[in-house]
Image (cartoon, grey):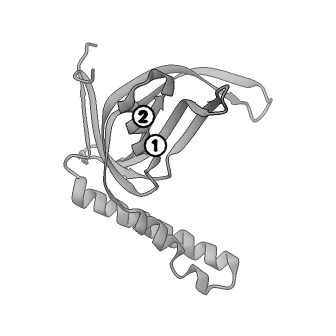
Amino acid sequence: MAEHNEARIVGYLTADPIIRDEKSTDEDGTERLEYAKCYLHVETVRRSVQACTMSRYSNILVFYDVSEASGNEWKMKLLKKIRSLKKGDVVSIKGVVVIQNTMQSRRCKHCGKIITNPTTMAFVYPIDLIKLTSYSHLIDQKAGENALNYKDDEKAKAVMRNNAIYGLAEANRRLIENYYEFSNTVTLLGYV
């Protein structure tokens, strides 16, 4: 399936996975998962190109959906893996690049009219996912460190915010140190 359109990414989750479940209840009262949609935001590092002065990091959207009615045991196992992830987990994902045409709507802030424009959305659809390690201790622990020593809520929030930024910087440093050479690989075959 993914021979001609394969993506391999290594990075950490910048937030907990967003999972939306659609459930139904059978006649006997048993609750059943009809459908689940999962969204993951994975921070990856990319090689620097001399002419490119943009950021070294890319936040890649990973989207996964599954229906229990499909009866596909493998897909349900992958859903279980995704449910076990949390912010800061380092994952290796093999998937396919999906480029989808869609319509984007927004409201004009001046007149209130809804404006709809065609747009293109790109994401990685996972085939397999492996949790390698976790940086959550860097992100979460640093965020709360020493914040309780302040009686002033605003000062505590500022300390938490600064520590969270430090934790993300440390996670990015470790991402470069450990996964720089193979964090993103994409193979696309086609014609122009």
Q: Is residue 174 visible?
A: yes
Q: Residue type at mark 2?
A: Met
Write down the residue under mark 1. 40
Q: Quadrant of residue 89?
A: bottom left
Residue 165 position within the rendered picture, expressed as x and y whole percent measured from the top left: 47, 66
Q: Residue at x 65, y 21 (%)?
A: 116
Earlier residue among tags 2 and 1: 1
- Relative to 111, 181 lies left or right: left
Write down the residue under mark 2. 76
Q: Residue at x 56, y 76 (%)?
A: 159
Question: Circle 2: is it few (<14), some (14-19), or many (20+) Cα within 10 Å?
Answer: some
- Relative to 118, 173 lies left or right: left
Question: Circle 1: is it few (<14), some (14-19), or many (20+) Cα within 10 Å?
Answer: many
Observer-nearest residue: 93 or 82? 82
Q: Residue at x 58, y 37 (%)?
A: 20
Say what secondary structure mark 2 lies in.
Answer: helix
Q: Is residue 67 visible?
A: no
Furthest toward the left, the residue is 181
